[in-house]
Image (cartoon, grey):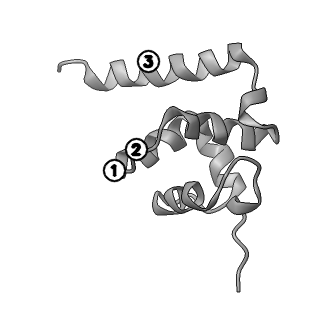
Amino acid sequence: METDELLGLRNLGKTSAQWLHATGIHTLDQLRQLGPVDAYRAVRARGFNASKALMFSIAGALQNVHWNELDPGYKQQLLEQLEGQSDIDSEPD
């Protein structure tokens, strides 16, 4: 049986890994390339009811730290990036 690379990452459990797989993210390299904000947005776009904690979990997984140990300034940056993208998406044509 093939091992699930995402399940081996810190902070990511079975459900998180399944959601990421459903978006086409199967490896650490793919996750790193997309980044925490876009990976979170991809999961939400597929209709999964993921909270922002998933975005922080992904960020922590990429840094190999528990998501609660992420620098508060970095967490704020992620939130601003997420909100900035949402604002762009919701602007009228």
* Number of numbered discs visible in the structure rendering: 3
- The amino acid on which the numbered mark 3 sits, given as a three-letter code, is Gly
> Height in image: 57 above or below 91?
below
Q: Residue 76's spot in the image, x, y percent?
A: 61, 15
Amino acid beneath label 2: Arg
Residue depicted at 64% across the width and 53% down the height: 30
Left or right of residue 90: residue 16: right
What residue sits 44% from the left and 18% below the top?
84
Q: Name the residue located 71 percent from the left edge and 54 percent from the top edge.
A: 28
Count residues near mark 3 (Cα–Cα under 10 Å), then give few for <14, some for 14-19, many for 20+.
few
Q: Quadrant of the C terminus?
A: top left
CA distance for labels 2 and 1: 5 Å
User: Is residue 22 shown above or below 58?
Assistant: below
Quarter of the image for residue 87 reads top left
Q: Nearer the viewer, mark 2 or mark 3?
A: 2
Residue type beneath disc 1:
Gly
Q: Which residue is mark 2?
A: 44
Q: Position of residue 37 (x, y in %)?
A: 54, 34
State the quadrant of the N terminus: bottom right
Q: Residue at x 60, y 37 (%)?
A: 36
Q: Position of residue 52 (x, y in %)?
A: 51, 33
Q: Which residue is mark 1?
A: 47
Q: Earlier in the sequence, mark 3 or mark 1?
A: 1
Q: How far separated are the C-alphas under marks 2 and 3? A: 16 Å
Label 1, residues with CA under 10 Å away: few <14, some 14-19, many ≥20:
few
Using the numbered discs, state the Cα–Cα distance from disc 3 to disc 1 in whole angstroms.
Answer: 20 Å
Q: Assign a secondary structure to mark 3.
A: helix
The residue under label 3 is: 84
**Disc 2, disc 1: CB below 8 Å?**
yes
Q: Position of residue 31 (x, y in %)?
A: 64, 49
N-terminal of the pair, mark 2 or mark 3, is: 2
Q: Residue furthest left?
A: 93
